Amino acid sequence: MRTSTGARVGQYAALLAYLVFLAFPLLWLLSTAFKPPRELASLHPTWIPKNPTLDNFRQAFDEQPLLHAALNSLLAALGAAVIAVLIATPMAYVMARRRGRLAKAATGWVVVSQAFPFVLLIIPLFLVLKNLRLINSVPGLVMVYVVWSLPFALWMLAGYVRAVPAELEEAAAVDGAGRLRTLVSVTAPLLAPGIVATALFAFITAWNEFFFALVLLKTPEKQTLPVVLTHFIGAEGVADLGPLAAAAFLATLPSLVVFAIVQRRITGGMLAGAVKS
Amino acid sequence: MTSVTEVRRPARRAPGGRDRPRRGPDHGAWFLVLPALIPILVLSVGPLIYGVLLAFTDAQSGRTEPTQWIGTLNFQDLLRDTLFWESFGIGLVWAVGVTVPQFLLALGLALLLNQDLRLRWLARALAIIPWAMPEVVVGIMWRLVYNPDAGILNETLRDLGLGDGRDWLSGLATALPAVIVVGVWAGMPQTTVALLAGLQNTPRELHEAAAVDGAGAWRRFRTVTWPALRPVALAITALNLIWNLNSFALVYVLTNGGPGGRTRLPMLFAYEEAFRYGQFGYAAAMGCVLVAVVSVLLAVFLVGRLRGGGDA
């Protein structure tokens, strides 16, 4: 289609403005993470560190139990992702293939749960988990994360199930395979990429989560990365900005890497759940 | 291929599935649903009902006397709690102040990304990154940007000769606008991706036909693009509004509600009430009020959608 030169220039100017707005905080975080204290305290901070250093990273590990927190985060996120996918896949199958009241109620819950205010949920959850002695424990947090990531997992998985032709399953049934057998040996393999994508997304969501972790984990040795990161904030002198930036950068890396892997499938999957047949 | 018109296909295919011999009334379905249903009931539906009930009690943390029903006392107190309504107003300003610019900016970006431009891949990648970042990290990152001494914002202003800059997050006047900018930045990905998907579903032939007929860019947008985009735009805006009303981590990290409560969103208020002061019942009542507001918003949205559908 024809586009006038003037319009093109305007489009590129707009694109450039977006690039600046989206990129500058990220670049500043990186820049701060590699700056020595003297440059951080300088009255005229520069974009590119003059004497880049890794000291901030060392200091970050000295100041806070980052490795231990990362381990807690990893356990919570892995547990949540695996369990969520295990229990969500069969239910998503029913939502996608059935028209009964059950499927409708499940879809309704997926939509309504988006509107849940966390406050109303967290107080009773706190009391329930306290009675079960699961406060300040990673397994308790995993339970909360599983339920919390279910709506999105169900939504995505139901979309992936719809993409598997029902005829295939019918053929298996004609050949005498039972329902469970069909599900395990015909449908599941075709769903595998979708299941992996959903699990990875659940992983990222749990890895990044802050509110539930803040309320439910009380002692430093149980806390996850986002909670530990907030310990850096507060009475920060200018010199402490470096370790803060370094720790924040490190905490983002795992979810960025995972996200880069699944990004296409996620955006595709969201749409599959929404519009694709 | 995805297209809006295909939405109804599964419905048409379903009767085919129903023709299959059914073995009893769906025992298999229950068996498949149960593993997810039990956790949902125990950790989502149950706590929600429990939470609503708590709002009518004097539940407090660490108290030895048994909790008692106190009727609507919490709500009566809440009505007179000017601090809460102040926080509530801030929450509305925040939610609308984030959602509206977010939509406009994301729409502009989606339109650009839908064009055949160089560097499109870079903008696409950058637009999606905030989605993958922990909210706490987004907050920390912007604290570094806003830092009065070592931050890049004040440094840029000094370089441009626009004064000495200020302490953005501690200023009574600047704190709320400053956190709103961060909210917009952080929420760009979902909105852009949804709108871009909507754009890619608009019929290209119609666009070309309109262009041949001499319709300008604005007219083409109004008559071809927008009608196709509308459902997606409404859905993502409603979701954004709800998500933003429930927002917590960003502002907790950026200002923790300060200065002087200028950025104390309702979620922060309720969190402090519940877990700093231990007023579980009162905080639950706040949660109920928030649910009511979200429900009203949803209702308004649905009504508007039905009515708007008639006009189109």
Image: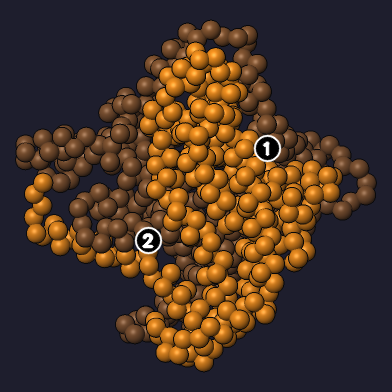
Chain colours: A orange, B brown
Q: Which chain carries label 1?
A: B
- Determine the residue positioned at 74% across, 50% down: A139
Q: In the drawing, does residue A47 fall left or right of residue B141?
A: left
Farthest residue toward the right?
A: B65
- Determine the residue positioned at 44% across, 22% down: A168
Q: Nearer the viewer, mark 1 or mark 2?
A: 2
Give, as a three-letter code, the residue at label 2: Leu
Circles 1 and 2 on the same subunit: yes
Q: In this view, does A248 lie above or below A99?
A: below
Q: Mark 1 points at which residue?
A: B44
Residue A57 drawn at (x, y percent): 57, 79
Residue B122, by quadrant, is bottom left
Q: Residues within 10 Å of mark 1 (few under 14, many from 20)?
A: many
- Determine the residue positioned at 43% across, 85% down: A49
Q: Tell me the quarter of the image containing the C terminus of chain A.
A: top left
Residue A146 drawn at (x, y percent): 65, 43
Q: Name the residue under label 2.
A: B126
- What's the distance in space between the residues labelled 1 and 2, CA to CA? 34 Å
Q: In this view, does B176 lie above or below B149?
A: above
Label tally: 2
Residue B79 drawn at (x, y percent): 67, 45
Residue B4: assigned label: none
Give, as a three-letter code, the residue at label 1: Ser
Q: Which of B170 and A20 is in front in this view?
A: A20
Residue A132, by quadrant, is top right
- Determine the residue positioned at 32% across, 40% down: B198
Residue B195 drawn at (x, y percent): 34, 44
Q: Which of A145 and B226 is in front in this view?
A: A145
Q: Which chain carries label 2?
A: B
Q: Circle 1 — which element?
A: helix
